[in-house]
Image (spheres, rainbow, N blue to C red):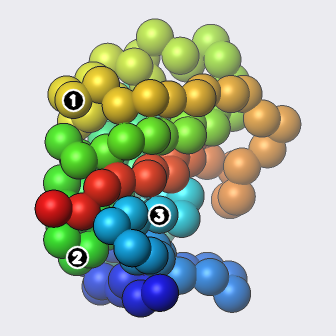
Amino acid sequence: MKTVSTTKAPAAIGPYSQAVITGSLVFTSGQIPIDPVTGNIVEGGIREQARQVMMNLGEVLKEAGCTYEQAVKTTCFLADMEDFAAFNEVYAEYFTGRPARSCVAVKTLPKDVLCEVEVIAALG
């Protein structure tokens, strides 16, 4: 296994890696809407936070050697299912290959953010 780390996405805030490569697959940790430059949660609603999450994931995927189009499966966590439609609008701009997906509402996310997304992608 190989760990993936980039300064263009938020550093892990616990005992984990931004992503791990094993075989021909990349498994990202969940990304939340932290601006990697300031270390702050982005201001705004679900659209702004979802966009930052997608940009963070893009940087981790890029460092791993792949793109959004190589995503096989995503898992999306929302603080409020009322945000589902707005989240989907942003999500669809990035994951154009339409990977398999699960999307669930959870009671609380780290730092009280509105969304978190993790990805499994294929290399090559």
Q: Secondary structure at mark 1?
A: loop
**Which of the two marks, 2 or 1, is nearer to us in this view?**
1
Name which residue type carries label 2: Glu
Q: From this viewpoint, is residue 32 visible?
A: no
Q: Hey, what amino acid is under mark 1?
A: Gly
Determine the residue positioned at 61% across, 47% down. Answer: 113
Label 3 neighbour load within 10 Å: few <14, some 14-19, many 20+: many
Q: Residue at x 50, y 46 (%)?
A: 117
Residue at which label 3 appears? 27
Q: Is residue 118 visible?
A: yes
Q: At 55% from the left edge and 37% from the top edge, which residue is drawn?
A: 76
Q: State left or right for residue 39 relative to residue 103.
A: left
Q: Position of residue 43 (x, y in %)?
A: 43, 47
Judging by the rendered image, the residue that carries numbered circle 2 is 63
Q: Residues within 10 Å of mark 1 (few under 14, many from 20)?
A: few
Q: Position of residue 69 (x, y in %)?
A: 18, 42
Q: Nearer the viewer, mark 2 or mark 3?
A: 3
Across and down, in percent, residue 7 comes to: 29, 85
Give the residue number, with chain letter if any, for mark 1: 97
Marks 1/3 in contact by CB < 8 Å: the verdict is no
Q: Secondary structure at mark 3?
A: strand
